[in-house]
C-alpha cells in the first residue's frame, strides 16, 4: 500500500528519488537530494551523515526508503555531525520539493553558522584536582576547535565522577554552563562542582549463593570496613572474586550502596551467584 503522506525512494547510485503524491509515483531528477546553503560541508558528507536507510524501491531495486520520520531523524544526525565538527549552532531546515523541467528534487536547507573554538574553561570549587588536571581530563585547551564538544563534556563528567568516587566522594555533583560568543566564535565553559562529604565503608556484606565462605571472599577484597570507599578497588576486588571460579561475573547492578548521610558512612552489599561450573549443594 502506498503511503499517502509521501514515501520517498532513492536509488543508491543515481540518487534517483520517487515521491508518492496521493498514491501516484513521480520520478525525481538524477540530482535527487540537494542541500542548499552549505558551504563547508559537501552534499555527500551531509547525505552520509543523515544515514538514510537502504530498502527496496517500487520496482524491487535496491535504494533508499525514506519517510518523513526518517527524514526528521536524518536531519538530527546531520545537525549532530556538523556540531561535532565545531559548528555548534548549525541548523537543518524543513525539506521541500521543487519541480523543474528536469523533474522533482528534494531540497534540504542548511545553515552551518560559525565555527566555534574553546574560550575560557573554568572549574569552580574543586579541592581534589587542579584546574590543569581537570582540563587534561576533559581534553580541553583554549583556542582548540570545539570538536565533539558535547561528547567531550559528557565523557569528561563520567571520568571525573569515577575519579571522585575513588576518593570516597559519593554525593559529588557538577553543573556545566556554557556561554557562546557568536561574534568572536568562542564558547566559554564553566563547571561548578559540589564535592560533598567523604564516605567510608561501615559494613561490607554478601548476599546470594556461592560455595565460598564469607571469610574466603573477604581475603580477596582490597578494601574493607573502616576504609574510604573506592570504586576502582571495589571493581578489582570483584574481579578477584570472580577469578576464584566460584561466582558468575559480578555486574554493577549486583552492588548496592546504602548511604548514611548523618555519619558519612556507606553499607556495601554484593549479590553473588554461584558459578555454573561449581553448583551449590
Image (cartoon, rainbow, N blue to C red):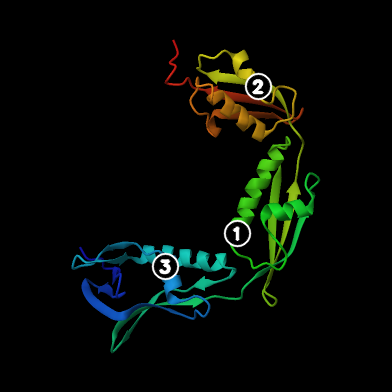
Task: Say whether disc 2 or disc 3 marks the residue closer to the N-terminus.
Answer: 3
Q: Residue 204 bears which disc, if any?
A: 2
Left/right placement of residue 116 relative to residue 66 reads: right
What residue is rendered at 51% in x and 66% in y?
A: 81
What's the distance in space between the residues labelled 2 and 1, CA to CA?
A: 38 Å
Label 3 element class? helix
What residue is rendered at 75% in x and 30% in y?
A: 264
Mark 1 neighbour density, 10 Å: few (under 14) some (14–19) many (20 or more): some
The residue to which callout 3 is attached is: 48
What residue is rendered at 74% in x and 30% in y?
A: 228
- Name which quarter of the figure residue 32 lies in: bottom left
What residue is rendered at 69% in x and 26% in y?
A: 223
Please state which of residues 94 and 80 is positioned toward the viewer in this rendering: 80
Name the front one of labels 3 and 1.
3
Quadrant for the C terminus, please.
top left
Name the front one of labels 2 and 3.
3
Q: Residue 150 bears which disc, if any?
A: 1
Residue furthest to the bottom: 101
Please state which of residues 70 and 126 is positioned toward the viewer in this rendering: 126
Mark 3 neighbour density, 10 Å: few (under 14) some (14–19) many (20 or more): some
- Name which quarter of the figure residue 66 lies in: bottom left
Mark 2 neighbour density, 10 Å: few (under 14) some (14–19) many (20 or more): some
Task: Say whether disc 2 or disc 1 marks the residue closer to the N-terminus.
Answer: 1
Residue 106, x across and y down, in percent: 36, 77
Left/right placement of residue 162 relative to residue 38 reads: right
Amino acid at each position: 500500500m502506498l503511503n499517502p503522506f509521501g514515501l520517498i525512494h532513492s536509488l543508491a547510485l543515481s540518487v534517483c528519488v520517487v515521491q508518492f503524491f496521493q498514491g501516484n509515483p513521480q520520478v525525481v531528477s538524477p540530482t535527487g537530494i540537494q542541500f542548499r546553503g552549505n558551504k563547508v560541508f559537501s552534499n555527500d558528507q551531509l547525505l552520509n551523515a543523515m544515514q538514510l536507510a537502504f530498502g527496496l524501491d517500487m520496482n524491487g531495486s535496491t535504494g533508499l526508503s525514506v519517510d518523513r520520520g526518517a527524514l526528521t531523524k536524518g536531519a538530527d544526525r546531520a545537525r549532530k555531525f556538523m556540531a561535532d565538527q565545531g559548528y555548534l549552532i548549525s541548523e537543518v531546515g524543513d525539506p521541500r520539493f521543487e519541480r523543474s523541467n528536469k523533474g522533482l528534487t528534494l531540497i534540504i536547507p542548511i545553515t552551518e553558522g560559525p565555527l566555534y573554538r574553546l574560550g575560557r574553561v573554568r572549574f569552580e570549587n574543586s579541592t581534589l584536582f587542579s584546574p590543569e588536571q581537570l582540563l587534561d581530563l576533559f581534553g580541553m585547551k583554549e583556542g582548540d576547535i570545539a570538536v565533539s564538544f558535547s561528547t567531550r563534556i559528557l565523557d569528561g563528567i563520567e571520568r571525573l565522577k569515577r575519579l571522585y568516587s575513588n576518593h570516597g566522594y559519593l554525593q559529588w555533583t557538577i553543573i556545566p554552563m556554557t556561554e557562546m560568543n557568536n561574534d568572536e566564535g568562542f564558547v566559554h565553559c564553566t563547571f561548578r562542582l559540589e564535592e560533598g562529604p567523604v564516605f567510608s565503608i561501615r559494613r561490607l556484606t554478601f548476599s546470594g549463593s556461592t560455595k565460598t565462605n564469607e571469610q574466603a571472599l573477604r581475603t580477596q577484597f582490597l578494601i574493607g570496613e573502616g576504609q574510604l570507599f573506592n570504586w576502582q578497588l571495589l571493581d578489582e576486588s570483584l574481579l578477584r572474586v570472580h577469578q576464584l571460579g566460584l561466582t558468575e561475573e559480578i555486574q554493577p547492578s549486583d552492588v548496592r550502596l546504602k548511604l548514611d548521610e548523618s555519619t558519612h558512612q556507606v553499607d556495601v552489599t554484593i549479590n553473588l551467584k554461584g558459578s555454573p561450573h561449581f553448583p551449590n549443594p
